[in-house]
Amino acid sequence: MPCRPLPRGDAMSPLLAVEDLSVSFVRGSLLDRLINPFPLPGFNVVDGVTLSLMPAETLGLVGESGSGKTTLARTILGLIRAAAGRIVFEGREVATPSDFRAMRRRSAMMFQDPVASLSPRLRVGTLLTEPQVIQGLPMPDRRAAAKALLALVGLPASFVDRFPHELSGGQARRVGVARALAMKPHLLLADEPTAGLDVSVQGDVLNLIGELKRELGFAAMIVTHNLAMIRHVSDRLAIMYLGRLVETGPTQEVFSAPLHPYTATLIRSEPFPDPRRRSHNPAVTGEIPSVFRRPAGCEFHTRCPLVQSRCKTEAPVYRPMGAGRMVRCHFPLQTGGQEREAVLRASANQRGN
Amino acid sequence: MSGSLAASGLSVRYETPHGSVQALRHVDIEAHPGEVIGIVGESGCGKSTLVTALANLLPANACIDGSIRYNGVDLTKLDAHRQRLLRGDEIALVGQDPMTAFNPVLTIGDQLVDFQHHRKDLSRAQKRARIAAMLGRVGIADAERRMQSYPHELSGGMRQRVAIAAALLTDPGLLIADEPTTALDVTMEAQIIHLLRELRREYNGIIIVVSHHLGVIAELCDRVYVMYAGEVVEGGEVDAIFHDPRHPYTQALLACDPARFHDRLDRLPTIPGSLPSLTQPPPGCVYAPRCDRAFAPCGSIAPPLTRLTACHAARCHAVTP
């Protein structure tokens, strides 16, 4: 089936738009499902996510483990099937497997584990040129193409003959970047691009992605739980909690004045590398609940320091709050920075005592 | 019972088929009861080898030089039986991965009873009562029911709390926490940091926290040792290390942490170059190949430990008191 063209907007139409996307995992074994005439309802691991990404923009997708951020990224590329919602890439809806194949030619994914995502039996040169071979692109000299890609990410040409186990974590990550960019994608999805890297190497990988982004002009979506890092590399942030977006907005504004209490607690929880500014109380207690037992009302009410009775029964809607910002909360934080800190700290104390 | 710990001139070498790897070289550290000591460094700096040496858990191909004196006894000279007694009773370790710290087929309660096998004076019921009290202290509600749970029924943060409870049950004089929050989410990390800080008020032994995360070290520790390529390059009070770092590596490491900058940076700072080989460490300063302040003697003469104040010292030719 051919891709259905959608009406194209002006120059500022998004590169990628995700509307109301849900992913659900069915619980129970295959046998269970065959025997049971009334199958269990699926559990939405990603629930009603609406997002857009402009050309050449960097979006940071932030959340704790279990928030569904990796699942969302994989679903966007068609590696997991969505239960509901639509994905629009470059103005065309992506629905069938062949649509996804066409989309993957112009988008790329960097997976979480850099070494495990490189086949241990192939040399770096083969790994780097596999995308072109799979997509059937003409390539007169495979070795030269691989060397050009290595040069792009600042690795010596002699690496074409190496095996993945001969690379350090940072080098493997660079090979991952090179492979992702082999097809000159318009969209790069990077899943935890710096997990497991030392801080001195982490900057290296992010600077490289930033430079290549300026040079090649692709858009990037970076999935991470590292707030300190994403603050410096993203234009916009999307915060996820239990499979739903709870806040989106320009990075600097979200950091300086978070609207959702969850965003505020995430920012306050990050230990600050200064012994003179030690935190006194944890900003939030308890743990992220399981999606199988999603709390009624607002999903954050079980841990929210500012919870009110309405939050326990009525689910808040995801609504716009001023320029480019969206929040899913009945009582978004609107006070100035210092007052907000005071509110949060006071409520944390009450709960602690 | 708790005493002071002092490692002096400690070196550890691993004999491998590819030659000997000098994982630790002339390390001097000391710790006194009631202190929280931080050991910070990037991967490959030898921090894990150091804590394994302190807990006497080095593999068979490791050779130790120097001494580790704890409570007046040199741990490196003890026989295997005496080491084992000490490990269960005096030295406790909280590992990085709360998922693999427990036996999956035994309940939490049974495993914590086994942890107290040195306490011959207590009955099983008394041990279980101690466990319930300790689980309550580390912030686990409903301790009696949790003791019936298997490890897989607990979340990562809860398992790390149980691991800390298990370590404290033996009343250790030395508690080593190796990357205690690395496997946890940021909100859980803040809670575990808070717990460790609460516990130290009542605990009068030594706590050693090993981490690569500068924020965790700044939040928890009194004194910090910075390690690079198997050496302690700088040590001092936490405030001195974070506000008056003297060794070029400490300075570079602190400058790399993106958490220190509030305004967006176009380029994140990095440390160019890579870790030297530990089979053939450089003859002079280990950091010289990457150091921007290296001068003539750095390449050939190993710098001595320069004492800057009473408890601040750095191993660098360029620093002067």
Image: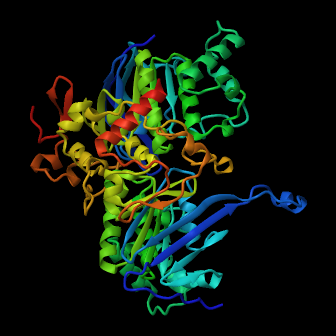
Residue drawn at (32%, 71%) of the image: A154
> Closest to the observer: A344 or A203?
A344
Q: Residue furthest front?
A: A310
Residue A172, percent across and down? 44, 64
Residue B194, percent across and down? 43, 30
Q: Is residue A121 left or right of residue A15?
A: right
* Residue B2 vertical position relative to residue B99 in the rendered view, above or below: above
Residue drawn at (27%, 56%) of the image: B270
Residue drawn at (25%, 50%) of the image: B261
Residue drawn at (79%, 55%) of the image: A28
The way the protein has been coloured in the rendering is rainbow
* Residue B61 vertical position relative to residue A46 in the rendered view, above or below: above
Residue B134 seen in render:
yes
Residue B203, percent across and down? 44, 16
Numbered label tally: 0
| Quarter of the image with the C terminus of chain B in it | top left
